[in-house]
Image: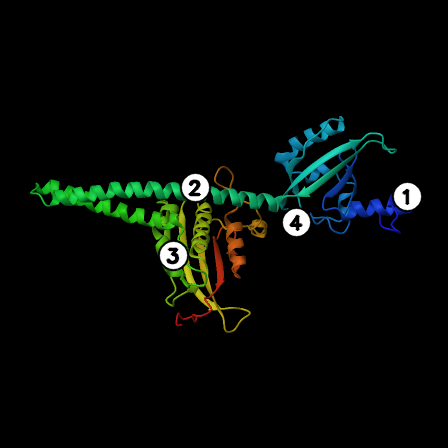
Amino acid sequence: MSEGWSSPFAGSLEDRERFYRTLVEQTRDVITVVSSDGTILFKNRANDHPAGYSEAELVGRNVFDFIHPDDLARVREAFDLALGGKAVSAIEHRFRFKDGSWRVFESIGHYIHDFPSGPIGVINSRDITERLSLEAQFRQAQRLELLGRMTTTSAQAFSNVLDSIVSSAEGLLECELPLSAERRVWQLRRTAHQAQDWMQHVLLFSRHERVRPGDPVNVNDVVIRLTSLLRQLVGSERALTFTLSASSPWLELDDVLLEQVIVNLVANACDAMPSGGIVTITTSNRPAPDEASRHQIVISVGDTGAGMTDDVKAHIFDPFFGTKSGAGHSGLGLTTVFGIVDRAGGTVEIDTEAEAGTTVHVALPAHSSIDHDGTK
C-alpha cells in the first residue's frame, strides 16, 4: 500500500458519503431508485441523463410511464419478481426519451426491504441501442455475404443451363423447320438471351467486385449497371424513372458501398408506396457549400408516397426506427445509408411533406482529381 494513502472507508461519515456519491454519479450506468409502486425517488447523473430529462422531470414520476407499451408486461413481471425477493436477470426494454424517440435499455434491479424509510428498488440501466445496431448490421452483413455466395453459385449453374438452351436453339435454327416452329425457337432463343443478361447483372452485384481505393467511380455507370436489379425491386406496380447528369459525376467511393446506398434508398421509396407510384433517381453536381474549389455529386431518390410527418422525419436515421412492421423491416435502411455517407464525408438531406412524397438527397464529395464537369 502506498505511503500516505488512506482508505475512504476509514474517514469521517462526510468523507464516506462523498466517496459513495462520487461512485454513483461517475458510473456509466443509470442508477434509479424507485418505491414499491415504481415511483422514482432518485437518479444519478443529475445533469447528464442520457434520455434528456433533468432530475426534477423524473423524480416523482412513475418509471412505468417511460416504458414502451409492448415491453411493459415483461418489465412489470421482472419488477414484481424482484420485489418478491427473487433473482432477476437483466431485461431489455425500450425507454422513451424526452424528444419522443425510443431507445433500448438493458436493466437489472433488486429490492432492499430493510431500508429505514421502507422497501426501495435499485435499478441499474444502460443504453445499448448503438450496440444492438452494430450487432444487427453485422448479422445483416453476414446474411448478405452468405446470400451473395449462394446467389453466385445458383446464378452460375443457371447460366450454364441457359447456355445449353441457347446452343440447342441455335442448332435447331440451322435445321429445316416449319415456320411456326421456327418462330417459337427464335422466341425461345431471345428469352434465353434476356435471362442470360439478367444473370450477368446478378453475378456482378453478388460478387462485390471492388475498385481500388482512389479509383474514380462514375455514379451514372453504377446506376445503369443496377437498372435491372432496381426494376425487379420496384416491381410491376411501380414505375422507375431516371434523370442522369449530362456531365460526368465521378466519386472517390467504393462502388459496392455506392450500390448499397442506391439500393437502400430505392427500397425505402418502395416501402413508402405500397399501393404503387413512381420512384425517380436523379444524379447531379453542385458546388460544395464550404469549399469553393470542390464540388459535390448528388444522388436523389424520390417517391410519390404519403411523405413524412415532422415527427417521423426527426427520427428517420435512428437505429431500428421505422414506420413499417413485420419481417423485413429492421429500420436499418436509412441508418445504413447515413453511416456510409457520413464516413465518406457527405451529407443526407430529406425533402418531404405529408401527402406530397419524399426525396432523399445524398451529397458526396466529387473525386479530387476530376473537375465537376468531368474533365481531368
Left or right side of 151 for 361:
right
At label 2, which amino acid type do we have? Leu
Left or right side of 14 for 45:
left
At label 4, which amino acid type do we have? Asp
Question: Is there any visible trace of residue 323 in the rendered image?
Answer: no
Secondary structure type for disc 4: loop
Secondary structure type for disc 3: helix
Q: Which residue is mark 1?
A: 10
Distance Cα–Cα, label 2 vs label 1: 60 Å
Q: Which residue is mark 4?
A: 99
Instruction: Tell me the mark number nearer the camera, choosing from 1 and 3.
Output: 1
Instruction: Tell me the mark number nearer the camera, choosing from 3 and 4.
Output: 3
Proximity of marks 1 and 4: CB atoms separated by less than 8 Å: no
Foreground of the two, 36 or 140: 140
Q: Which residue is mark 3?
A: 223
Foreground of the two, 335 or 61: 335
Residue at image coords 44%, 44%: 145
Proximity of marks 3 and 4: CB atoms separated by less than 8 Å: no
Distance Cα–Cα, label 1 vs label 3: 71 Å
At label 1, which amino acid type do we have? Ala
Q: Earlier in the sequence, mark 1 or mark 3?
A: 1
| Label 3 packing within 10 angstroms: few (<14), some (14-19), many (20+) | many
- Residue 125: horizontal and vertical position, in percent? 70, 41
Instruction: Tell me the mark number nearer the camera, choosing from 2 and 4.
Output: 2
Q: Earlier in the sequence, mark 1 or mark 4?
A: 1
Foreground of the two, 369 or 354: 369
Distance Cα–Cα, label 2 vs label 4: 38 Å
At label 3, which amino acid type do we have? Val
**Which residue sits furthest right?**
12
Q: Which residue is mark 2?
A: 146
Distance Cα–Cα, label 3 vs label 4: 37 Å
